[in-house]
Structures are given as C-alpha cells and as structure tokens.
Amino acid sequence: MESLIRYFQPPKKSYFLFGPRGTGKSTWAKQFYQSAAILDLLDPESYRLYKAAPERLNDFIQTYQKNTTTFIIDEVQKSPELLSVVHQLIERNKKYQFVLTGSSARKLKRSGVDLLGGRAQLKTMHPFMPSELGDQFCLKTAMQLGLLPLIQNSVDPVGDLKAYITLYMKEEVQQEGLVRNIDQFARFLEAISFSQASVINFTNIAQECSVSSKTIENYVGILEDLLLSFRLPVFTKKAKRRLATTPKFYYFDAGVYVSVRPKGPMDDVSAMHSPVLETIVAQTLRAWIDYSTKEGKLFFWRSKSGLEVDFIVYGEIGFYAIEVKNTSRLHREDLNGLIEFKKDYPNAECILLCHCKEKMRNDHNILCYPIESFLKAIKPNQSLPA
C-alpha cells in the first residue's frame, strides 16, 4: 500500500503519542520529523543501556543537539525512568521537543507521566480512518480485517491479525508480569469478546474463566491500559428519564475483535456482524474527535426500559445521536431509540446508519445514511455528514 497522509496533527511542544501497536506511530514520527534523533527502546541494546542508566540520555542529547532539537523516544513505557531526565532537559532548554511514543500507558501511569509536570500533552494515534484510506477503503474488508495500518500493509493480514494479540500477551503482559496466570488471561480475552459493543457482565465472564469478578475487573483495566480496549459511558446530561449506568465494552479495532472472537462449530458467527459494524463506527468517531481541535466526547444512551442509541457525540464539536443497523431494510422499531432520544434532546442531530442505497430524512427528522458513504465522509475539524 502506498504511503498515506495521516490526519494526526502534532503539538509544537513536547508530547506523548500513545496508540496500540501497529497504528503507525513510529512510521509517522520518522516521516514527519525527518531530522529528529531517534532512541528506539524496542532495540534490545538500547533498552539495556538506558534501563541501567537513564542519565545516559544526556549524552545522547549532546551527541545530536548540534543537528536537531527534536528527539523521538520510541516505546518510552519500556523505561519510565527516562522521563525524569526528559523533564530536566526540557527545563534546561525550552527549544527541545520530545516526542514520546508508547503502546502502553500502564507503567507510565504508575511512575512516569506526572514527572513531566504537565509539560507534555497526551495525544493518541488511532487506526486508519476510512477517509484516510479514501478509495482504498472497503467496508466489507474492514469488517474482516479492521483498519490497523500494520494489517493494511501486510502481505498476510489474516495471519498477522492472529499473531497480534499473541505478541501483546508475550511482550506486554507476560514479560511485564501484569498477570499471574497467562492461560487464564488468554481465556478472558476470548470470553470478553462476546461482550463486544455490549455491557460487561462481570459475573458471567468470571464464571466462564473460573476466576473472581474482581480478577475480571482487573483484566479489563489491563486491556485498557494496554490501549487494546475502551469503555463507553452512558450519556446522562440533563436526563429526563431513568437511565442505565454501566458502560459498554469495545476492543479498539474491528479486526482485532474478529481475530479474538471464537468461531467454533458451536459459536454463532453471524452474531459478530452487528458488533463488528458498530466497532468500525466507534473507532472512526473516536479518531474524528481526537484529531479535531474542538472538544467532544463519545457516549451511548440507554434507558432503564431498554431503549438505546449506540453513540452520542457531545461537546463543542457538536451534538449527535447515531444508531447503527446491519440491515438494508429498516423497520419502525429500528428508530425507537432515536425517536425517544429526540424527545428528550430535540436539538440533537439524529442519524441512522444502515446499508441503504441513498440518504434520506424521514418524518421524525432522522437522517438515514448509507454507512459506507458516511464513514468515508468523516474528516477531522468538519461536521459529521448530513
């Protein structure tokens, strides 16, 4: 695949660039900062040297500072101790810019990020947005392989997807000692895949994995710290009815979810289609919000009576209610959640995404939009398609 221009726009000062492995952080940084000095902590020798003596970073800077004031530390979570040295260097020379990439926030949360005293912003690199791929985006393919650049550029995308979680388990979970029983954690990864785009039932998953609910809660926290999953909270602003309170769970990329979800003879593979479609919308909206300059957050809405809207976007960026349906033929009940949400929040733009052939606005002022066209039209700093 030819090199694509990413939407991510970096700050002018030092910043952390987080994102799961394979989202293209290192590739982007090396292309964008072509004159930068790069310290790659995935290199075993570099990792050993700077883990043993973080102050060696001073020598590294002195070696390259005549040619550049930009320094990339790749996979900085491997050695959080370096951040205290980075802090000192930033204080010493305001012209220095450090780009600190990481595929796990867990160790930095415990011992690193605060050491920079707010002097470095936190940014995120997401999988491709459909509009970044342009004409290369195919919804059917994305539902099978997801949108990770690592997979999009692979000669064996299916094989690399299968190896993706295994690599995380080996290099991030097992080597870092995040769990005591790696086999239990592997079972958990499969068990929680049945909760994709749904509320997590910790008790059921705990029984499936033969562990306590508290252990499952810890495992979910590990997934989030490794940037492999996220949870959507319920939208409750000025609520006019009783609402659910439990968030929904998502693996961060549709392809990763597909690769983890069991597909044996007793598993209903067709049950994956709707969660996969919803995941593609979720990850695209997250990227759109993070890459835009206006503030916004992503939620979902569910009443105690069971009415639901898949996504609520709220903030300076706009106010949208979005329902996703894996069908080309809509029925009245498909609109119920949006209709009721519109009653409570009449100023929200309500959108229903499905496999219809063309967009139309119905009698309830709900915009029905072909989902593939909608996804390809979403771009940072622009309103959602209407």
Image: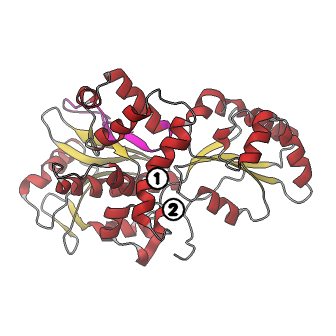
Task: State which quadrant residue 241 falls in.
Answer: top left
How many residues crowd around disc 2 within 10 Å: few (fewer than 14), some, or many (20 or more)? Answer: some
Instruction: Pick whichever, 32 or 192, lies toward us.
Output: 192
Residue 147 makes an appearance in the image: no
Residue at 19%, 58% (x, y): give it. 325
In terms of sequence position, does the residue under pointer 1 or pointer 2 come before the other?
A: 2
- Does dot 2 land on a helix, a strand or a loop? helix
Q: Residue at x 16, y 63 (%)?
A: 327
Indicate which label's residue lies in the foreground, 1 or 2: 1
**Image height of 195 relative to 361, above or below:** above
Mark 2 and mark 1 in contact (Cβ < 8 Å)? yes
Q: Which residue is mark 2?
A: 150
Residue 181 percent across, percent down from the top left: 43, 29
Left or right: where 53 falls relative to 261:
right
The kind of residue on which mark 2 rests is: Leu
Which residue is identified by label 1? 164
Q: Please name the amino acid that badge 1 sits on.
A: Tyr
Residue 350 placed where, x, y %?
A: 25, 55
- Is 315 covered by the magenta stretch? no
**Res. 66 mark:** none
Q: Residue at x 28, y 49 (%)?
A: 347
- Residue 284: x percent and y percent? 40, 57
Magenta-colored segment: predominant secondary structure: loop
The spot of residue 90 in percent (x, y) is: 81, 40
Magenta region, residue range: 225-249
**From mark 1 to mark 2, how far is it between C-alphas?**
10 Å
Q: Is residue 244 left or right of residue 116?
A: left
